[in-house]
Image (cartoon, rainbow, N blue to C red):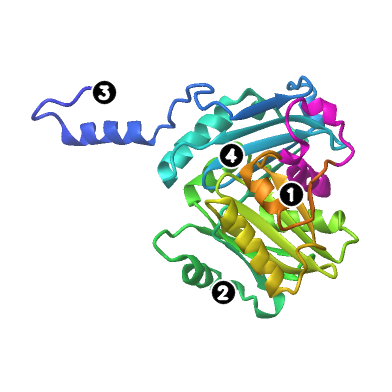
Amino acid sequence: MKIPKRGANLRRATEEIISIIAAPPRVEKKMIKPVFHLETTELNAENSGNANLLMELNEYAFSYLVTSDNHDILAAAYFVLPDRDDLSHAHALREIIYGQDMLQHPFRQTICLYNFSECTLVPDEIYNSDINNDLTDVLFGNLRKNLVLTEKHHEAVAHTVYRVPSNIHSLVHQKFPNGSYWHLYSLWLKAMKDSASADKEVIELIFTSDKMLVAVFKEAQLQLLQSVPYSTPEDVVYQLLNYCHEFSISPEECLVIVSGYIDEDSALFNEMKKYFLKLQFDQLIGSDQARLGEYPVHYFSYLQKIAACVS
């Protein structure tokens, strides 16, 4: 753009600047590279219509999983978003969702899971849709007026109330206008109910790069669902032991099921093994583990189960 000379028509120059700012940014294809990328079969515009696309988005990362009708994993990828303010976040996300070949295919079903931390469960008996905005302001502050969404799910007899950056939701909805949009809490609860364990005391965990999602069950009843930030393995163990104390659960007898981005030889997993004797990684639903190559199945298990419970 040329800077207008002194005395040039100010209105014309202003309109030119506005048109440049408003134009969608050019996408340099695949500039943001995935931390890992997996394709177990070749997908194209002709055969992707029989597959399901599930995306997960939080403050720091974007991932997707493509599954077949019988729940086999066909493709998966995980991206770290380099910037954390809303504007940079949106530009990075735009680059990914418009630049990845896989995400340009038509799918039988497209689901977007928001996993933003500004989320809470509200029991039915005290839920009031008129105060959702006030509730999120009280719980999470009111510096940013983001989009407040809510979902009712019978599994917990409660509502999920959460906030999503408005520009992020607009961007994703523009790209996937026929998709369905949920908070991870809502569909994770449904998936856990569908694959409920017979154990009386169960803690299910999902690990991301900066937080863990915790679901505590006792006598098949949900006691707690929470997103917990952590920095060290000791942080995680402290929180889990605190939950055990609060709900009178035995660490030695409680079944702890782990999924997400945690490795078996990590300091975190080894620290957890010191206190929890029934600690195990989550498993896939009827999928051939060999298809995933070097990647642990628990990286994908929670997303695969969520995809299965809504397909």
> Which range of residues does the magenta coloring cover?
285-311
Which of the two marks, 2 or 1, is nearer to us in this view?
1
Q: Distance between the residues labelled 1 and 3?
A: 53 Å
- Of the image marks 3 and 4, the number of the one nearer the N terminus: 3
Relative to residue 51, is residue 141 depicted above or below? below
| Residue wearing tag 2 | 130
Q: Which quadrant would the N terminus be assigned to in this image?
A: top left
| Amino acid under disc 3 | Met
**Dominant secondary structure, magenta:** helix
Residue 155: x percent and y percent? Answer: 79, 65
**Which residue is nearer to you in this view: 150 or 17?**
150
- Of the image marks 1 and 3, the number of the one nearer the N terminus: 3
| Residue wearing tag 3 | 1
Give me the disc on residue 62: 4
- Of the image marks 4 and 1, the number of the one nearer the N terminus: 4
Residue at figure coordinates x 62%, y 76% from the top left: 128
Could one spot residue 282 in this view of the protein? yes
- Of the image marks 2 and 1, the number of the one nearer the N terminus: 2
Say whether residue 128 is left or right of residue 42. left
- Local crowd size for mark 1, using a 10 Å CA cut-off: few (<14), some (14–19), many (≥20): many
Give me the disc on residue 258: 1
| Amino acid under disc 2 | Asp
Residue 302: x percent and y percent? Answer: 75, 46
Residue 229: x percent and y percent? Answer: 55, 55
Q: How far apart are marks 2 and 3 (CA)?
A: 47 Å
**Which residue is nearer to you in this view: 72 or 154?**
72
